[in-house]
Image: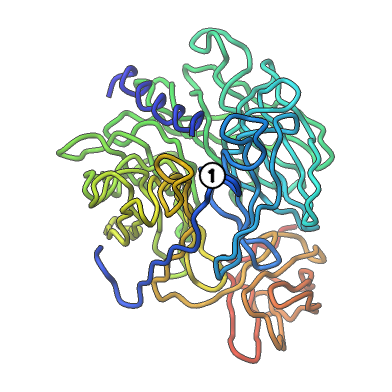
Amino acid sequence: MSKLNFCMRACVLFVLWATTTMTLPAQTFKSLDSFDNTNAAFPWATLLQANDGNFYGTTQNGGNTACNLGCGTIFRIAPNGKLTTSFSFNGTNGSQPIAGLVQAANGDFYGVTTTGGAYSLGTVFKFTPNGDLTTLYSFAAETGYNPMGTLVLASDGNFYGTASSGGPPTGDCKPSGCGTIFKITPKGKYTTIHHFNGLPDGGLPLATMIQAPDGKLYGTAAAYGNAGSYGTVFTITLKGKFTVIHQFNDTDGAYPFGGLILGTDGNFYGQTDLGGASQYGAFGTVYKMTRSGKVTTLHSFEQTDGDNPISDLVKGTDGNLYGTASYGGKYPNFGTVFKITSSGTFTTLHNFDSTDGSYPYAGLIQATNGKFYGATFAGGSSTACEFGCGTVFSLSVGLGPFVKTLPNSGKVGAAVRILGSDLTGVSSVTFNGTTAKFTVISKSELETSVPSGATTGTVEVKTTKNTLNSNVAFRVTK
């Protein structure tokens, strides 16, 4: 795949950004709602399940008409499908939010907009549950701009993210810079901790980073790198020590627009937008990567099962990986939802047909009720947008409820929130078998702290109806 073809693909995605089954047992797909541009339009980002049990997300357009097609919104949707616009951006405080939201332990949300703000290059903002928004930082060319990945709340209490462009315009990065990695405190103190240089460390970082148990952040850069300019995987410490651990070569994938997730086996999993070994074309891959950067291709898309995946995967409570492909599928180009095992067995779960959504750029989230939720960029029932304004959907594959912790690591005595879908009549909370005191905040939230003697392992919550386990092990730190 040539650089020219990559640029054509990137241009298609950025134009959309700027303008606009196999049946399995117990599998149920449901369209929850369609955006209509007045309330919101064109969601890119993966939803967030908040501590009130509802889902929150952003849309690139819709809402305030100070911008062409609307400046974008923050929306809330209940598990039963009731949709509410929580906030409309106006350009001055940001516009076109493509990234999703992250929620801090105090309940406030943090996020970024891709444009708008003081220099029209994007913002970092805080949004409270009662609807107040504060702009914490406006991006500038020299420090990075146009952020497209969701912030990550790291173990030091600060937020880390990437800006897709900006920084020193040198070498491969002329004229606009190859992007940056930044840190921002909850109060808005901003620090650039890395400037991408094109060759050899990559550029155009579009995805959300993750923090691994070793404390490092892991992420992807969608372009450049020494192995033919197909993108890289990198690590960076919270103090800014940067290392490239893999360079894609097209055969093992090209242009990782999506980020990484950490599997229970200690390996990382991700997707690339293009590349792979398909006999019909380079439609993207699902890959596994070791901590040292060795990549194994688990699946090369064939277009009939989807193509051009640009989102993150999600690990289900059954141990399998679930994801979306932006295009391809049965109808024939509206995208798919799929499942893949850690050994590479691939199953298409749903083919979008435009009436139920199209172009699922966003990834999936597994909610604490066991179902998966997602959004499509276009399609749906509204005629307010030429190709539909997008949808929110759910997909049940028969998995049961669970609880999740916020955060998922901490020292003895650290405050922890436990989120669930029906925390009625809780009788006990344990951290890997060690009993913890708790307070019931609501049917979807508990407050507790890491008890003395606790070790790394599963958090268990017993209710009058169920015994619920955490979807990931809670890591007790020193």
Residue 294, image quadrant:
top left
In this view, the residue in front, 475 or 107, is: 107
The reply to whether residue 290 is in sight is no
Side of 249 relative to 162 (left or right)? left
Which residue is the extreme one toward the left? 279
Circle 1 sits in a helix, a strand or a loop, which is it?
loop
In this view, the residue in front, 466 or 388, is: 388
Residue drawn at x 58%, y 76% as measured from the top left: 469
The reply to whether residue 1 is in sight is yes
Residue 355, placed above or below residue 67:
below
Residue drawn at x 41%, y 39% as measured from the top left: 386
Which residue is the extreme one toward the right? 187
Mark 1 is on which residue type?
Ala
Return the residue at label 1: 41
The N terminus: image quadrant = top left
Residue 101: image location, x then y, percent: 65, 48
Residue 329: image location, x then y, percent: 26, 50
Residue 241: image location, x then y, percent: 64, 30
Residue 179, image quadrant:
top right
